[in-house]
């Protein structure tokens, strides 16, 4: 006998219960997954570069950028000034050498440094004398001054200086290998370092006073939290015990540590501030700790859902994500607020079905605002947006599946508060579409006339100004260049590449004569092209003719020494790049040489080989970066590269600014596309009343831009991302206003939602990180405008819009 069919009402009752249990199992899986991912601790990422846009340009340029930066990432520089310089330098070097080590357990020892140089002997390797490494190549290496002298008089004017060197007590002449000291002169021209040996220390002059120089190589990544803490603690301890000493710092680890500390502070202040404000508001409105716990339940579930999935997708969690995730407090609770406010006012008449369309559309609009950020070429922002979107989805599922099943008390004061708020904030008349259109036209005109933009790199740099000033002082004292501006040069083979580099070097040297202040780091200055080496060898043979005989006669040298010296000119090898880079002086230029890079490029020469490549670094000096000369230099370099298909000019800082500008422009199209898609959905559901839904978000967006234009605040990519959030939250408010616009409970929920969002996102306006500051400023102004606009566009009770069912 067939059992009777189950009633439809019982099936309908079982479905939500089944989904609620299923959601609980999903969260349980998230708990287990999170425990597994955190078995070795929370993998945190503090890289500032994670906020930089990805640059899908030439793979060769990407490789050059990586190679130019690799030599600086794991290295740091300290300049120490002290009345007892040698003693304090020794103490500091010892403290850094022992930093990170575990005295009680050697097996757990994790030293901070792999190497530190601070004494004059640290940069001297007895087996790496540059004169010995380049001995057989010396006759092909002449300075420009020696070439000019030999070309003028055959080298006769070099005899007198050579005689003085031969008989100088401090000299070390070699009358056979190098009677004229050619190699010593050439090496002297290569040694332009400001580092000097003084009292057993490495020193650098800063404003005319010597400072001890300490150069360290990290044993781990500069973004490693443990390394940052060890470095910070060591330097703080030294400065505390040596108050008379001062330190100048330079290195990525110091900027990474500053960014990490700032992010941790803001996680505490912004997240804790938003949380405390949220708790106080909810207790004041709902008068029940149980209701408060219910309000926080979706938030906890959202974070629990987002954290393991974000870690699984990205591998590491950026501290900026945690700081931004703190702002999730304000919006994740919105859905619970709408549900609880409706239940508090309507009591047993509460039905989830009545709220579900608005909750769903609100989720969709917010997700669109967040997910638009995942399209950006910025890994850090993609992670932040993913974390927030997953958190919202988790919170929404918890509200829809769990909260209606909870039986919680409702305070009569909540209903009275809703009614008072309704009376106090309801305008006597609504906003007319014609008035709204006029306001749009006026604000659009002001925006187009006055609004400016800013795409500079400082938006991504949270380092304090004091640290940036120290970095500038150290770089200026050392005369170093991190490779932000360079020419990328390619050629079929090494000889052609060196020839091309030499010609470019001559051109740039000519610019100096024209008043363009710059200096270069060029491989061709150290490894002359083969044809140049042949010409120099011919000059040396001329020098070893009559001038050498004159030198020998006046010095009283045996004629056999002359013959032995001339014999060394036979079979002189050509200096190549590999030999130079393996020499003690050549190691500093290894970052310039790319060789035959293994890229996905199909470019090959006629012999089927990939081209060789190198970079020529360009550093402006003097006031070239502070006045119109900087623009002139950029134009000159751009034109110079345009003249040769094998030369590419790269300005890394300008390139990043261009990428931020492109991203800022693309966001406009993303917003337009998102609004167009949503408008179609809203028109389908609300018909002519759609303008009432769109007015709060779009009016707030135009209002923020107009205020920026009038106050002179430039628009940047992060303020635009903040406007995306305003649009998502504003659409949420507009949807509920039209869905249930004449209900006091709905207006209370919208007000609480806006207030909590202001707490969460608005507090970011006080962030010291420029990116978060501008994002928060946009949200602070925009959300306030959303709240002000909603009452003016609520539909009249007599003309409630017809809605299609979802």
Image (cartoon, helix red, strand yellow):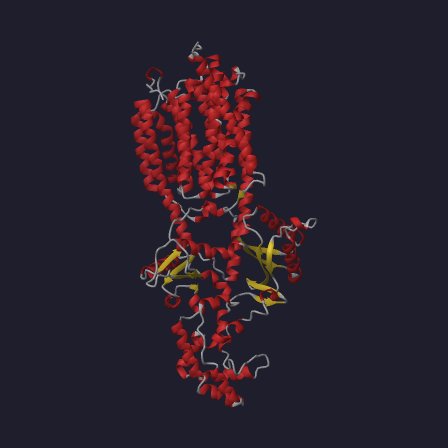
Task: Tell me the quarter of the picture where residue 507 sits.
Answer: bottom left
Q: Position of residue 625 (x, y in %)?
A: 42, 57
Question: In the rendered view, does 288 fall on the left or right side of 589?
Answer: right
- Residues 74 and 687: in front is 74
183 relative to 608, above or below: below
87 relative to 339, above or below: below
Q: Position of residue 43 (x, y in %)?
A: 55, 42
Q: Is residue 467 visible?
A: yes
- Residues 454 and 356: in front is 356
Q: Residue at x 33, y 20 (%)?
A: 804
Q: Residue at x 34, y 32 (%)?
A: 675
- Residues 792 and 287: in front is 287
Q: Is residue 336 visible?
A: no
788 relative to 108, above or below: above
Outermost residue on the right side: it is 104
Q: Position of residue 94 (x, y in %)?
A: 65, 57
Check the picture and name the quadrant holding the N terminus.
top left
- Residues 619 and 621: in front is 619
Give the mark count: 0
Outermost residue on the front side: it is 1
Q: Position of residue 789 (x, y in %)?
A: 39, 27
Check the picture and name the quadrant holding the C terminus.
top left
């Amino acid at each position: 006998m067939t059992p009777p069919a189950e009633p439809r009402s019982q099936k309908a009752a079982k479905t939500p219960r089944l989904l609620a249990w299923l959601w609980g199992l999903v969260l349980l899986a998230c708990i287990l997954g999170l425990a597994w991912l955190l078995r070795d601790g929370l993998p945190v990422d503090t890289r500032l570069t994670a906020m930089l846009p990805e640059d899908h340009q030439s793979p060769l340029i990407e490789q050059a950028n990586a190679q130019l930066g690799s030599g600086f990432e794991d290295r740091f520089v300290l300049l120490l000034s002290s009345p007892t310089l040698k003693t304090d330098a020794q103490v500091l070097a010892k403290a850094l050498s022992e930093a990170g080590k575990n005295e009680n357990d050697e097996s757990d020892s994790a030293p901070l440094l792999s190497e530190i140089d601070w004494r004059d002997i640290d940069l001297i390797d007895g087996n790496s004398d540059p004169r010995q490494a380049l001995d057989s190549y010396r006759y092909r290496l002449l300075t420009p001054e020696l070439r000019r002298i030999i070309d003028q008089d055959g080298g006769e004017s070099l005899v007198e200086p050579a005689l003085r060197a031969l008989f100088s007590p401090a000299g070390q002449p070699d009358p056979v290998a190098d009677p004229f000291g050619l190699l010593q002169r050439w090496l002297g021209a290569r040694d332009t370092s400001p580092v000097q040996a003084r009292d057993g220390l490495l020193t650098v002059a800063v404003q005319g006073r010597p400072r001890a120089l300490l150069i360290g190589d990290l044993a781990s990544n500069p973004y490693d939290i443990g390394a940052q803490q060890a470095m910070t603690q060591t330097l703080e301890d030294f400065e505390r015990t040596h108050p008379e000493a001062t330190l100048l710092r330079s290195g990525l680890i110091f900027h990474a540590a500053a960014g990490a500390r700032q992010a941790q502070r803001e996680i505490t202040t912004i997240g804790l501030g938003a949380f405390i404000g949220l708790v106080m508001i909810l207790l004041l409105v709902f008068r029940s700790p149980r209701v408060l716990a219910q309000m926080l339940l979706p938030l906890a579930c959202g974070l629990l859902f987002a954290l393991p999935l974000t870690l699984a997708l990205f591998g590491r969690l950026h501290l900026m994500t945690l700081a931004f995730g703190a702002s999730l407090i304000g919006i994740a609770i919105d859905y619970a607020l709408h549900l609880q406010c409706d239940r508090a006012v309507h009591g047993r008449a509460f039905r989830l079905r009545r709220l579900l369309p608005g909750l769903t559309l609100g989720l969709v609009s917010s997700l669109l605002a967040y997910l638009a950020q995942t399209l950006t070429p910025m890994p850090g922002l993609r992670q932040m947006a993913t974390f927030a979107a997953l958190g919202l989805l988790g919170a929404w599922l918890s509200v829809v599946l769990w909260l209606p099943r909870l039986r919680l008390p409702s305070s009569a004061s909540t209903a009275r508060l809703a009614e008072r708020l309704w009376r106090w904030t309801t305008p006597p008349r609504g906003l007319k579409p014609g008035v709204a259109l006029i306001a749009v036209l006026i604000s659009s005109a002001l925006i187009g006339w006055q609004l400016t933009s800013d795409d500079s790199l400082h938006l991504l740099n949270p380092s304090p100004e004091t640290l940036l000033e120290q970095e500038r002082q150290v770089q200026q004292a050392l005369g170093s260049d991190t490779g932000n501006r360079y020419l990328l040069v390619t050629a079929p083979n090494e000889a052609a590449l060196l020839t091309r580099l030499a010609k470019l070097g001559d051109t740039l040297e000519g610019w100096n004569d024209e008043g363009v202040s710059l200096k270069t780091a060029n491989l061709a200055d150290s490894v002359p092209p083969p044809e140049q080496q042949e010409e120099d060898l011919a000059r040396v043979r001329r020098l070893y003719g009559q001038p050498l005989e004159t030198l020998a006669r006046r010095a009283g040298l045996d004629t056999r020494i002359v013959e032995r010296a001339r014999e060394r000119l036979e079979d002189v090898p050509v200096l190549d790049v590999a030999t130079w880079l393996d020499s003690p002086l050549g190691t500093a230029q290894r970052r310039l040489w790319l060789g035959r890079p293994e890229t996905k490029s199909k470019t090959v020469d006629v012999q089927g080989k990939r081209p060789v490549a190198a970079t020529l670094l360009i550093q402006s000096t003097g006031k070239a970066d502070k006045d119109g000369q900087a623009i002139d230099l950029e134009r000159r370099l751009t034109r110079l590269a345009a003249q040769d298909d094998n030369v590419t000019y790269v300005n890394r800082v300008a390139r990043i600014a261009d990428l931020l500008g492109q991203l800022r422009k693309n966001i406009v199209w993303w917003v337009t596309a998102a609004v167009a898609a949503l408008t179609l959905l809203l028109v389908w559901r609300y018909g002519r009343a759609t303008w009432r839904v769109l007015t709060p978000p779009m009016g707030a967006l135009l209002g923020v831009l107009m205020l920026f234009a009038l106050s002179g605040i430039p628009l940047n990519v992060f303020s635009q991302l903040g406007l995306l959030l305003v649009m998502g939250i504003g659409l949420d408010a507009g949807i509920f206003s039209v869905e249930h616009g004449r209900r006091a409970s709905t207006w209370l929920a919208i007000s609480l939602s806006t207030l909590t969002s202001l707490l969460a996102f608005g507090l970011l306006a006080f962030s010291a990180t420029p990116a978060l500051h501008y994002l928060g400023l946009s949200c602070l102004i925009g959300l306030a405008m959303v709240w002000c606009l909603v009452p003016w566009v609520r539909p009249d009770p007599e003309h409630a819009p017809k809605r299609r069912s979802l």
